[in-house]
Each structure stands twice: as structure tokens, then as C-alpha cells.
Image: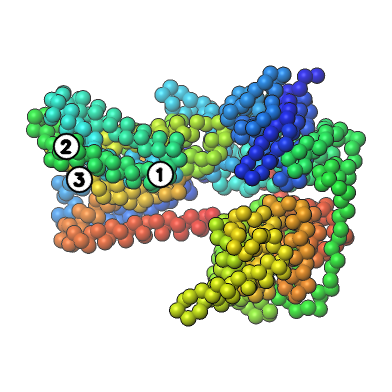
Amino acid sequence: MTNLVEMRGIEKRFPGVHALKAVQFDLRPGEVHALMGENGAGKSTLMKIMSGIYPRDGGEMLVDGRPVTPDGPRAAQELGIGIIHQELSLMNDLTAAQNVLIGREPRRSFGRLDEAALNAKTAEIFASLNLKMDPRTQVSTQTIARQQLIEIAKALSYKPRVLIMDEPTAALNDAEINELFKVIEMLKADGVGIVYISHRMDEIKRIADRVTILRDGAYIDTVQAADTPLSKIIQLMVGREVTQSAPVIPDSTASPVALEVRNLSRGHEVRDVSFDLRKGEILGFAGLMGAGRTEVARIIFGADPRDDGEILIDGQPVDIRSPNAAVQAGIGYLSEDRKHFGLAVDMTVRANIAMADLGRFTGPMGVLNEAAMEDTAKDYIQRLGIRTPSDMQDVRLLSGGNQQKVVIAKWLLRDCDILIFDEPTRGIDIGAKSEIYALLEDLAAQGRAIIVISSELPEVMRLSHRIAVMCEGRLTGILPGGAATTQEHIMELATRRGSALVDAEGQQ
Amino acid sequence: MTTTTQDAPASPLARIIAAGTHQRVLAFASLIVLLIGFSIASPNFMQTSNMIAILQATSVNGVLAIAVTLVIITGGIDLSVGTMMTFCAVITGVVLTYMGMPLMLGVVAAVLTGAFCGACSGTFVAKMAIPPFIATLGMMLILKGLSLVISGTRPIYFNDTPGFSEISRGSLIGEVLPSLPIPNGVLILFIVAAVAAYILNRTVLGRYCFALGSNEESVRLSGVNTDRWKIVIYALSGAIVGIAGLLIASRLNSAQPALGLGYELEAIAAVVIGGTSLSGGRGSILGSLIGALIMAVLTNGLRVLSVAQEWQTVVTGAIIILAVYADMMRRNKTS
């Protein structure tokens, strides 16, 4: 059987990173080929090369046996290659139909649009997806899950022969995933080749025919999904035997409550959320994209106003209306986007650490005490194990993990008793991850109260003493940490809501 | 108008009051309130001659506001429309007065000059990736300088082209309906508005204006040649600025090379009052038209009430801040 797509010896370099090293990949008609690997393994980069978004630096790509070099998304579309992007990339101000057929609007003479044909064509695509939605619906009024379905409809509208799905189910619930899998089966029957990227192991077993594994930008192996145990796939992904170590959970039930949140609400994003957090405890927050975890953190930190609810620190009600007030009250928030909000990357490690509390290094007349800043910076570099040639190194030259440690140092300097970590290990390699984990456990052992928000379930399960799960703004449950709680328990709570498909029927 | 509601709107009225149009309704209501307020305060205000004066005063700013609306909806900004308008007028002066060409060629020259200047700005923004604020700031100064150089810093008069002043000051409507001598400048404003609104809402070009302002990367990844469309949009906007150049030159019967700075801010103010989002993706021609009318009514009404001109500027500034604040409040509530 000839391959639909074949990629051989693909090379890609970004400044400072060798992202793909002689990677190979092939796709046959009518198969689902899963592409697996940890974050940063190069899956998305390889698919962006296949779909013409990035040029390749080396290697060759064949479609139907003919060498091709798609030089843009349109060229790839003409080859029949479509992609559903991981992050939602819809135009919120336009309607569903206008999004689905962007760039291919039915036109009449003089560039006039045929809006009726546009809506009719989109309605047809929605019907084939079993999606009940008015094509004239404005995208911004839709939930994340329904936006994801619009995105899928958009990719299908190109009638692709190759369809790349980059984590298509990240925001979908079970009913919607079943619906999507039916569509995938239909496409398979039509001879469409599907590249499927997902972190959910159960999905791989359900729909994949073959699995290709990448690790650190290199090709590892391609195996048959049916007769390869999951543990084998995980081992290939990680490069070693993984034993999921359950955390040692200290008994913190006797320690005082540091933070209490009662009936917190803000619009549709956060609905009636209540929980408490004890000193020395790590409370994990799990949930799908858009479940409202970051929103809860931002309200507690005073970055967003709340409509309703109470926050108590050490049993005292506090009225936090700004991040500044939150810091005064001893709350630290480490945002998921370090580079935007957490660090001045063009400044030195010393300057970044000292910035958190410049007042203590300021002498009379506003002169900064460099010697004191140096001592403090060196102290934290040593205590947190920040790998940097000196405290005068620019932060942008450090690795992701060490940058994250600089952010942590900043908040420790401010003596925060309550620390909220939002995606603390995003973009950090595995070795550095375990160091960050150890650091968080250390901080908890010192009596600090810690909230960890993470989209990676293994991370939440590895760290948390208790696990709070959110879905569509509601706190759907708090599970105990440790081996008793499985991924399935968490996913069940994270998807405990009405199906978008059923909702739509209710509306009609 | 595209419908912004979730279900098919029940009636045209429901469509007008649909979510996306609140700011426009608010602006329209403000306009009515201003008109009623001023007519109670002064009996002279509501006279036909004064109404026509207000419309005439709106025409140039209105056309400029329409031009800049297109660019703002893409998420850009155009600071050069004021001096570009003057530059188009100067080129028309060169063609008609210096070269003695027929009137029609002067009109074509103004529009083409504007389109060319717009295409240049669009190229700087799209191909050279210069932020629109900087690219059009540069264009603003280049065109101001060129106007002065080409004209030798002296006004160019159109005394040899008798029909020229009719473009703005004549009245085709008045010939048919002598009781309603609405000047041609106003007629042109409304024609430009109607055409621009049609383009924005019913053509591919308009669709890409909104799409670019909403999520440019997504449009690019959908295989659309975003650079080319951006250049086309800036060029169309420039062509409309060329029409504004004709209007002002016709009204003054001369191209005044020193004029122009400050018009861009008045136009942007009208757009903002009309509810077009400066972050792109949302806006309307009707809104900008209402915004320009509000500014003209305010200036005229305060003058009728003998309020000092200095205070008129203060009031305009306050209105801009109020209008945007009202819009932010509404958006925070709905999101």
C-alpha cells in the first residue's frame, strides 16, 4: 500500500533548540496514526511542518509518493492536508459559518458575499457532525467545547485527505468525544488518514491503529496500537521505566486553616466555589481548559473582581481588591506565563530576585544597596539550586526550570505564606520538573499553604495532598490525594456537566 | 448587518437592538438627546439652515471617519488621514490648476493618490511588519512635508475650474426640491457611507476587515493571504480619504497645504464615539457617521448657545471618555 504521506529525516532548528532530529513519519489511507511524546518532544512542530506552517530545515516529505514542500497553510490544504490546532484559533467576533468557511466564502460578482449559501453550506457540515448549532451563532457566545466543535467543522470543510488533530478532545466531555470518534470512523471509512495527538492513553487504545513515539525531538519507534501495552508506550515516551510514585501525604488536619474561600462567584467563569487550605498542605486544582481554575486564583489574588463570596485568611475575613493588597495579606501568585507576568527576562537574576521587595534594599536618598541584593540573590541561588553561572546572568539565558526557580525566589523573599502556582512546570523538562516538585514539597513542609493548578493529571496526582476538581466554573468535588484516587475519578468530576450537544437540542 | 444574536431575530427592531449594536443605539440616543436639548435651549438651533450647516460641517470629518473605521476594524490605526487628505487636495490642485486638466481628471487624481498613499501605509504594516501607529505616523509627516514642498507652501486656488466648488457647495437635491437645499458634500458623505457599509457587511473585503481584527493569526493559518488583503483595505481607506480631500478643497475653493493636522484625531474620535472597538473586530460605518454627527451637533449647538470655542474642545474630550467608558462597562457586563 502506498503511503498517503511520508516524511523522512525531517530536521528543524529554532534558535538554541534542535527541535527535530532526523524524524520519520508515515501515514496510510484510512488509518488513525497516533503521535505520542511528552511536552516538547516535537509532535506539534512535526505536524506544523506537515501542514505548511513551518518550513523544514532538512529531510523530505512525500505525498502520494511525490516529493512536496508546502510553503504555507494554503499549499498544504491544496495537497489535502488539514489541521485542527491545539489552541483554539477562531475569530470570536464572527459567526460560526463565517469562521468555518473563512477564506472560501461563497461569492457573487464583484466580491459580494453570498451569506445564504455560506450558512447553508455550514449547516450541512454541522449536520454531518451531528452538531445542532445555528450557523449564524456568534462564536464568542459559545462554550469552549462548542468552539472546539466549530474548529473541527472548519477542518472538515476542506474535505481533507489527511487530517491532523492536535489534542482535539482536550475540552470535550464523554458524549462529545463519542460523537467525535464517530466522525473519525466515518472519515477512516472514506480513506482519510488521520494523525492523532493526545495525552489520553485510553483514547489511543480506542481509536489508534499505529502509534509513533517521539522523545526530545528524535524518532523512537512505531508500534501497532492493538498489541502494544500502554506501559510499553509510556516507557518509550519517557525513556525509562516509570513508576508513578504516590506522594507521601503528611497529616495536616491538625494544622490551622490558612485560607478559606466561601461561595466565590464571578459571572459564568466561577460559580459558587468554596474550599479551605491548611498550612503545610498542597491543594491541587484539576480540570479541563476553561474550567475556571486560573480564574479562581486570579480572584483570590485580587487580579479580577468577584461578584460574590468571601475570602478568609487565618480565620479573618479580608477584602482583597488588588494584587498589591493580596501580597500585603501574604498571598503569592505565580502565573502560568512566566515571561509575560513573572520575570523581567532582560535583567539579571539578582535584579529579578530583589525586585520583589526593593524597599528592603533601598537606603536613604533612594540608593540601592547592591551588596545586600547580591547576598540575598546568592542565598536563594544556593537554597533553590538555581543553575546559573553567577547572580549577574541575564534571566533570559537560563533554562525554563531555572527561570521558574527565580520566580519562586521572588515570592519567597516577600514572605508569602500562601503560594498559588499556576502550571508551575509548563515548558520545563522532566529533570527540572522533579526538582520543582521537591521544592514545592519542601515549602509545604515548612508550613506554607500551597495551591497547584495543573492541566497535567500526573502532576496533580504526584503533588497534591488533596485534589479539587473544577468543571465549567463549578467545584465539582475534592478528592483525597494518594494512590486511592485515579485519573478516571478526576476525569469523571472534570466532565460532570451537561453535554453541549444535548444543550443545543434543549435550545432549539 | 450580520446577525449577532444566537437565534434568528424575530423582527428588524430586535436586530437593531441586538447585543452587538448597543453602543450604536446609545450613540444614536445621545444624538437625539443633544438635538432636543439644544432646540429647547435655543429656538435658532432647529432651523433648516442651521441643520444644513451642521450636515455640511459633518461631511469632511464624516468621510474621514468612514475611511479610518475600515482600518480600525482590522485592529490597526491610521494617523495619516488628515495630512493625506491635504496631500490629495494639493495633487488635485496641481492637476487642475497647474496642468489645466479637465475636472474629471482632478477627481480621479485625488482618489488614486489616496489609494496609492493607503497602499504604501498598508505595505509598511503588512510586508515590513511596522506597527500601524508608527507606519502611519511616518506617513503623516511625509505627506505633510510633501504637500508643502509640491505647493511651495502656497495655497492652490481653483478659480480656473468653475465646476470645482460645486462638488461640495452646489446642491443637486436643491434643484429638485428648492425647499431642501442640501449641499452635494452632504450627499457625497451619505453615498460614501452607504457604499462603505455595503462593502463592510456584504463583501469578502469587509469580511476580512472583521476577521483580521478578530484574530489575524487564525485568518493567516486558514490560508488567506492576509498581507495582500491588509494592503487592499488600507488602499480603499486611502481612496475614501481622497474623496475627503476633494470635499475640503471644493469647500475652500483651494488646496491649503498647511491644513490637515488634527483632522485624524477628530476622525478617530468620531469612530470611537460610534462604538467601533480600537482593538479591532467590531465596528460599523453607521456608528462612525453618528459619531461624526454628534461632534458636529455639539460644536454647532455650543456655538449657538454662545459658549466659548475653548470650552467646546473640553466638552468633546469629555464625550470621548464617557463614550468609551460606557462601552467598557457594557462589555464587562456581557462577557
Quadrant assignment, res A489: bottom right
Is B161 or B319 nearer to us in this picture? B161
Residue at disc 2, secondary structure: helix
In the picture, the quarter occupied by the N terminus of chain B is top left
Amino acid carrying mark 1 in the image: Pro
Rendered image coloring scheme: rainbow
The answer to whether the residue labelled 3 contacts the one labelled 1, judged by CB atoms less than 8 Å apart, is no
Determine whether, in the image, residue B264 is placed left or right of residue B206.
left
Is B227 or B239 nearer to us in this picture? B227
Is B56 or A485 nearer to us in this picture? A485
Q: Which residue is mark 2?
A: B151
Q: CA distance from mark 2 to mark 3?
A: 12 Å
Does residue A55 appear in this view? yes
Q: Residue at x 32, y 61 (%)?
A: B318
Determine whether, in the image, residue B299 is placed left or right of residue B320.
left
The answer to whether tags 2 and 1 share a subunit is yes
Residue lying at the far left in this picture: please name it.
Answer: B159
Residue B335, position as x, y percentages in the image: 54, 54
The answer to whether tags 3 and 1 share a subunit is yes
Q: Which residue is mark 1?
A: B132
Earlier residue among tags 3 and 1: 1
Residue A290, position as x, y percentages in the image: 65, 53
**Label disc, if present, on residue B259 of the rendered structure:** 3
Q: Residue at x 85, y 34 (%)?
A: A223
Q: CA distance from mark 3 to mark 1?
A: 23 Å
